[in-house]
Image (cartoon, helix red, strand yellow):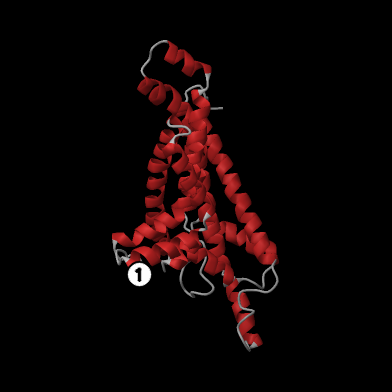
C-alpha cells in the first residue's frame, strides 16, 4: 500500500506540474496584458512596472522563476490588489467556500444515497416516481435559478434567511442548496441505478435463496458493491464543490474562492489565476487519491497495483 501511495503521489506531482505549465503558457500567450487597460500610462512608468513584475524577461526565465517560487510556497503578489500575496487572498476566500461546500457535500452524500436506495427498493412505486421527477428537475434547473428562487421565497416572502452574506448559519443554507442540487440529483439517480443493477446479480439471488434476511442482503452484499460508482463520482465532486461556485457566491454576495477565481480571470491577474488553478488541481488529485484508497476498503477484491 505504501508503494502504491508513493506512486500516486508522484503521479499527482506530475499532474499538478502539467496543469501549472499549460495554464502559464496559455496566460502568457493571450493578447494584451494585465495593465493594458490602464489609461495614458507613461512609458517610463510602464517600463518600471514591467521590470517590477518581470515582464521584460524572456518567457522561459519567467516560467523557471515561477516554478522556483512555487516550490518554496510563494504564489506571487496580486497585480490588482497590489502588495497582497496570492496565498493570503486564497486563505481569505477559501474558508467561506469550504463551509458552504462542506454543508452541501454532507447533504448530497446522506440524502442522495438514502433517496437512491429507497427508490431502488420501491421501484416503479410512488416514492420512486416522485424521487426521479425531483431528481430530473434538480439536474436541469440552473443553479442561479435555484439561488434566486430560494431568496425570493425564504427571504422576501417568509423572511427566514438573509438575502446575502454568511454572518449567521442561516446564510449558508441557500448557497449550499444552490451548489449541491445538481450533485444531489445525480447521486440519487446513480445510487438507484447502481443498486438495481447489483440486485440482479447471481450472488444476491443465492443469498436470498439461502434464507438470509433482506436487511443483510441489502446492507452487507448489495450496498457495498453498489457504492463503488458513487465513490468514483463523489471524489472529484468534493474537490469541485469545496473550491467554490461563482454563480452561487455572486448571487448571495459571498467573497468565496469561486468569485475570486472569476474576478481574477476578468482582471488578468496572473498570480491569482495561477494560484487558484494550482490550488484546485492539488485538491482534485488528493480527492482522487482518497477515492482510490476507499475502493479497496469497500471492495477488498480490488488490489493496489
Q: Position of residue 62 (x, y in %)?
A: 64, 64
Q: Residue at x 66, y 86 (%)?
A: 43
Asked if residue 259 is positioned above or below residue 187 in the image, the reply reads: below
Q: Residue at x 38, y 47 (%)?
A: 107
Using the rendered image of the protein, determine whether residue 284 is visible from the camera's viewpoint. Answer: yes
Q: Which residue is mark 1?
A: 156
Asked if residue 281 is positioned above or below residue 233 in the image, the reply reads: below
Q: Residue at x 35, y 57 (%)?
A: 173
Q: Position of residue 128 (x, y in %)?
A: 45, 37
Q: Position of residue 6 (x, y in %)?
A: 52, 35
Q: Among all residues in the image, which is located at the extreme front?
A: 126
- Categorize mark 1 by other alpha carbons within 10 Å: few (<14), some (14-19), many (20+): some
Q: Residue at x 58, y 75 (%)?
A: 52
**Count of marks, rendered view:** 1
Asked if residue 24 is positioned above or below residue 204 in the image, the reply reads: below
Element at label 1 = helix
**Nearer to me, 58 or 256:** 256
Using the rendered image of the protein, determine whether residue 1 is visible from the camera's viewpoint. Answer: no
**Nearer to me, 145 or 64:** 145
Q: Position of residue 110 (x, y in %)?
A: 38, 41
Quadrant of the rendering where the C terminus is positioned: top right
From the viewer's perspective, tell me whether residue 46 is left or right of residue 85.
right
**Nearer to me, 130 or 277:** 130
Amino acid at each position: 500500500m505504501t508503494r502504491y501511495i508513493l506512486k500516486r503521489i508522484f503521479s499527482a506531482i506530475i499532474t499538478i506540474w502539467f496543469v501549472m505549465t499549460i495554464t502559464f503558457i496559455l496566460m502568457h500567450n493571450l493578447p494584451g496584458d494585465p495593465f493594458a487597460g490602464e489609461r495614458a500610462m507613461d512609458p517610463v512608468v510602464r517600463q518600471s512596472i514591467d521590470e517590477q513584475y518581470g515582464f521584460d524577461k524572456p518567457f522561459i526565465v519567467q516560467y523557471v522563476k515561477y516554478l522556483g517560487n512555487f516550490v518554496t510556497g510563494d504564489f506571487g503578489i496580486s497585480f490588482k490588489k497590489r502588495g497582497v500575496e496570492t496565498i493570503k487572498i486564497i486563505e481569505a476566500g477559501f474558508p467561506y467556500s469550504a463551509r458552504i461546500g462542506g454543508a452541501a457535500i454532507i447533504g448530497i452524500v446522506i440524502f442522495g444515497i438514502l433517496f437512491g436506495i429507497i427508490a431502488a427498493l420501491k421501484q416503479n412505486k410512488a416514492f420512486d416516481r416522485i424521487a426521479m421527477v425531483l431528481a430530473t428537475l434538480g439536474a436541469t434547473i440552473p443553479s442561479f435559478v435555484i439561488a434566486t428562487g430560494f431568496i425570493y421565497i425564504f427571504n422576501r416572502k417568509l423572511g427566514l434567511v438573509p438575502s446575502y452574506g454568511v454572518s449567521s448559519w442561516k446564510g449558508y443554507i441557500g448557497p449550499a442548496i444552490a451548489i449541491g442540487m445538481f450533485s444531489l440529483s445525480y447521486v440519487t439517480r446513480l445510487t438507484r441505478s447502481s443498486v438495481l443493477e447489483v440486485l440482479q446479480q447471481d450472488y444476491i439471488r443465492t443469498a436470498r435463496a439461502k434464507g438470509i434476511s433482506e436487511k443483510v442482503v441489502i446492507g452487507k452484499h448489495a450496498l457495498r458493491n453498489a457504492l463503488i460508482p458513487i465513490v468514483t463520482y463523489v471524489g472529484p465532486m468534493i474537490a469541485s464543490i469545496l473550491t467554490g461556485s461563482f454563480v452561487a457566491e455572486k448571487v448571495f454576495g459571498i467573497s468565496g474562492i469561486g468569485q475570486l477565481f472569476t474576478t481574477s480571470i476578468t482582471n488578468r491577474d496572473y498570480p491569482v489565476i495561477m494560484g487558484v488553478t494550482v490550488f484546485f488541481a492539488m485538491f482534485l488529485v488528493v480527492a482522487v487519491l482518497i477515492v482510490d484508497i476507499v475502493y479497496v476498503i469497500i471492495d477488498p477484491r480490488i488490489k493496489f497495483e
